[in-house]
């Protein structure tokens, strides 16, 4: 790998770790304010709205200067959002500022790989990026849970540190330091020398028109439209379930926010395992065979709704020395891992198809922008619905069941639509041709 690649990986790991710890810390800050439960989904809603509003413009911004500088500015803005939370800005508003930084960071993170590395190294490079992201997701979630534990709050209270008098505020300070560290690492990313034709940010209507064209092209392609629909829906559900799992763990299992964060990290472990299995078992030409896994994922989520600490004997525990793990928690961990594994096995081949069709029809950058836009529209809708359900005091198991049923029904609808496209238009032939072209290129070289 070229000089600078591992610096990119280090920056991505540190920034992603902070992203995942931040959610737990921000929820804890809301708890310190005694906020009503339906405000929690608004954290992710304000975060995601930047991806939607800025989708036509972040690509041009990313291309307007060296990618390392874009990532530096994005991580600095994230750190500023954390600092504002420490100084009393409402967590929801400050989280929205962090979202602006995240929206700017995303295209630079992927775009710099194609500038820095030859095509033959891109698969390996993306593997490194995904491994760093999954690892940081697991560690960041656990770190966030550990930092908001009551014991940390008691310790900080005894030290009388200004602005850091609670566990939530201490956690936010650590997250801010992580973003600052990521920004410092970004300084070491070399300028690749890549320069692009000017796409003037001063002409937003032109950029919006280009984005609208890419949007229409992907949604009118009979293969891309199916993949775009299912990944959009599953992404929206996944972000909502990220919050739902924390609430479900507290209501149904009686855990703390820290315990719920551990359950979230187990989902990440399952996600990594499922993604790895899909990468080895499903070549591009068979990617659409993963569609039924989406329905199975929906049923697994419905099953989660009916599980609680009374499902198994409450007096049974597994002892590790003096530490007792209740049987219901031992059952909850594999359930989380299974949901994560199913999601990972489903998403990897779907993303591969969308990247291929996006590259053929448009460009990788345009297709990623459209995918991000659609996914975050789904996030806004589902989080808004979740907030309304919480405001109406609908029980958490019912909410989980609702989202599980929606996933099953929409996945079944998309499977029927894809089967019709195969029957009438033979859309799978596009993937077969792609594999033949790839094999021909390999033989040529």
Image (cartoon, rainbow, N blue to C red):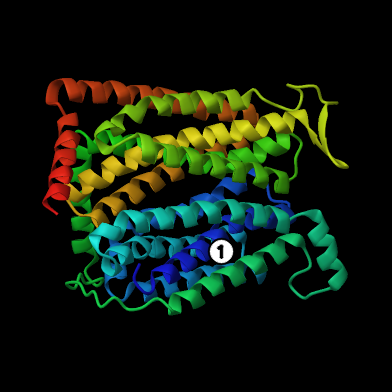
Q: Residue 104 at what x, y percent from top left?
A: 39, 65
Q: Residue at x 50, y 50 (%)?
A: 45
| Residue 262 drawn above or below residue 173 | above
- Residue 102 figure quarter: bottom left
Instruction: Determine whether, in the image, residue 238 is placed left or right of residue 441.
Output: right
Residue 191 appears in view: yes
The quarter in which the N terminus is drawn is bottom left
| Residue 377 drawn above or below residue 200 | above
- Residue 230 figure quarter: top left
Q: Residue 81 at what x, y percent from top left?
A: 55, 68
Callout 1: helix, strand or loop?
helix
Residue 252 appears in view: no
Q: What is the tally of numbered marks visible in this picture?
A: 1
Instruction: Decide which of 193, 421 is in the foreground and name it.
Output: 193
- Residue 56 figure quarter: bottom left
Q: Residue at x 50, y 35 (%)?
A: 341
Question: Can you identify the residue that label 1 sits on?
Answer: 94
Dot 1 surroundings within 10 Å: few (below 14), some, or many (20 or more)? many
The quarter in which the C terminus is drawn is bottom left
């Amino acid at each position: 790998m070229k000089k600078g690649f591992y610096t990119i990986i280090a920056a991505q790991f540190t920034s992603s770790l902070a992203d995942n710890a931040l959610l737990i810390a921000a929820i804890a800050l809301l708890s310190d304010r005694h906020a009503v439960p339906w405000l929690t989904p608004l954290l992710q809603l304000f975060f995601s709205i930047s991806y939607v509003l800025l989708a036509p413009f972040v690509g041009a911004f990313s291309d307007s200067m060296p990618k390392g500088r874009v990532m530096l500015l994005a991580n600095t803005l994230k750190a500023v959002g954390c600092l504002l939370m420490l100084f009393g800005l409402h967590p929801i508003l400050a989280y929205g500022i962090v979202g602006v930084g995240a929206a700017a960071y995303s295209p630079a993170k992927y775009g710099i790989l194609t500038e820095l590395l030859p095509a033959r190294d891109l698969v390996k490079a993306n593997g490194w990026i995904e491994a760093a992201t999954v690892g940081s997701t697991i560690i960041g979630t656990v770190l966030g849970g550990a930092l908001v534990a009551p014991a940390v709050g008691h310790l900080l209270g005894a030290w009388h540190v200004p602005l850091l008098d609670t566990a939530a505020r201490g956690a936010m300070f650590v997250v801010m330091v992580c973003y600052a560290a990521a920004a410092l690492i970004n300084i070491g990313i070399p300028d690749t020398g890549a320069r692009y034709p000017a796409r003037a940010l001063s002409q937003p209507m032109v950029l919006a028109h280009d984005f609208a064209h890419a949007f229409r092209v992907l949604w009118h392609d009979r293969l891309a439209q199916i993949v775009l629909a299912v990944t959009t829906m599953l992404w929206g559900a996944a972000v909502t379930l990220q919050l739902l799992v924390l609430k479900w763990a507290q209501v149904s299992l009686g855990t703390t926010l820290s315990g719920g964060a551990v359950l979230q990290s187990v989902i990440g472990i399952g996600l990594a395992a499922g993604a790895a299995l899909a990468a080895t078992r499903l070549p591009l030409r068979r990617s659409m065979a993963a569609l039924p896994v989406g329905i199975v994922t929906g049923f697994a989520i419905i099953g989660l709704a009916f599980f609680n600490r009374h499902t198994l004997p409450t007096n049974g525990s597994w002892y590790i020395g003096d530490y007792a793990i209740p049987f219901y928690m031992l059952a909850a961990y594999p359930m989380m891992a299974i949901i994560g594994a199913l999601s990972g096995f489903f998403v990897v081949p779907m993303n591969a198809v969308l990247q291929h069709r996006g590259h053929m029809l448009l460009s990788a950058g345009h297709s990623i922008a459209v995918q991000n836009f659609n996914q975050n529209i789904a996030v806004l809708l589902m989080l808004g619905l979740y907030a309304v359900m919480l405001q109406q005091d609908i029980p958490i198991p019912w909410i989980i069941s609702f989202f599980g049923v929606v996933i099953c029904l929409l996945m079944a609808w998309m499977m029927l639509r894809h089967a019709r496209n195969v029957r009438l238009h033979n859309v799978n032939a596009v993937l077969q041709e792609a594999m033949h072209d790839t094999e021909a290129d390999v033989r040529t070289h």
